[in-house]
Amino acid sequence: MAAKYIIASVAGAFAIAYVSDLLVSDSKIFGGTTPSTVSNKGWWEETDKKFQAWPRTAGPPVVMNPISRQNFIVKSGSES
């Protein structure tokens, strides 16, 4: 019996969130305009061409957590 209340409240919350997003972003109830960089298809195509033309250069892969990988070198005190 409690499941139907939970499912209904979750569905209602999603409906309220969707309507709120629609009103604020698409209907612009608080004013504002859509930037030309978003609405201009030509601008987006030219920007995409520029990003695709840049060379991809990078260094070796970086280990985010070397302790979990155990691939680090431990120097003894006499070597340094």
Image: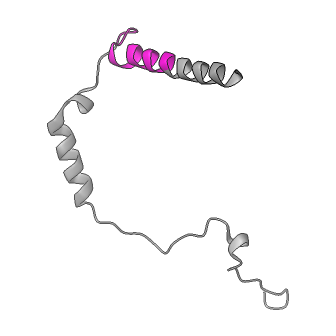
Residue in the foreground of this view, choosing between 3 and 39? 3
Residue in the foreground of this view, choosing between 78 and 28? 28
Percent x, y for residue 25? 38, 19
Q: Quadrant of residue 75?
A: bottom right
Q: How many marks?
A: 0
Is residue 60 positioned above or below 2 on the image?
Answer: below
Query: Could you tell me which residue is drawn at 72 percent across and 70 percent down?
Result: 68
What secondary structure do most residues of the magenta stretch adopt? helix
Where's the N terminus, which quadrant? top right
Q: Is residue 73 left or right of residue 20?
A: right
Is residue 23 positioned above or below 67 on the image?
Answer: above
Q: Is residue 12 magenta?
A: no
Q: Is residue 28 magenta?
A: yes
Q: Quadrant of residue 69?
A: bottom right
Query: Could you tell me which residue is drawn at 53 percent across and 22 percent down?
Result: 11
Percent x, y for residue 2? 71, 22
Residue in the foreground of this view, choosing between 65 and 6? 6
Visual colour scheme: one colour
Query: Could you tell me which residue is drawn at 27 percent across and 54 percent down?
Result: 51
Q: Is residue 3 left or right of residue 76?
A: left
Q: Quadrant of residue 40?
A: top left
Residue most toward the front?
Answer: 1
Is residue 31 positioned above or below 9 on the image?
Answer: above
Q: Is residue 28 left or right of residue 14?
A: left
Query: Could you tell me which residue is drawn at 29 percent across and 22 percent down?
Result: 34
Residue most toward the left?
Answer: 42
Residue most toward the bottom?
Answer: 79
Percent x, y for residue 66? 68, 71
Where's the C terminus, which quadrant? bottom right
Looking at the rendering, the stretch of residues picked out in magenta corresponds to: 15-31
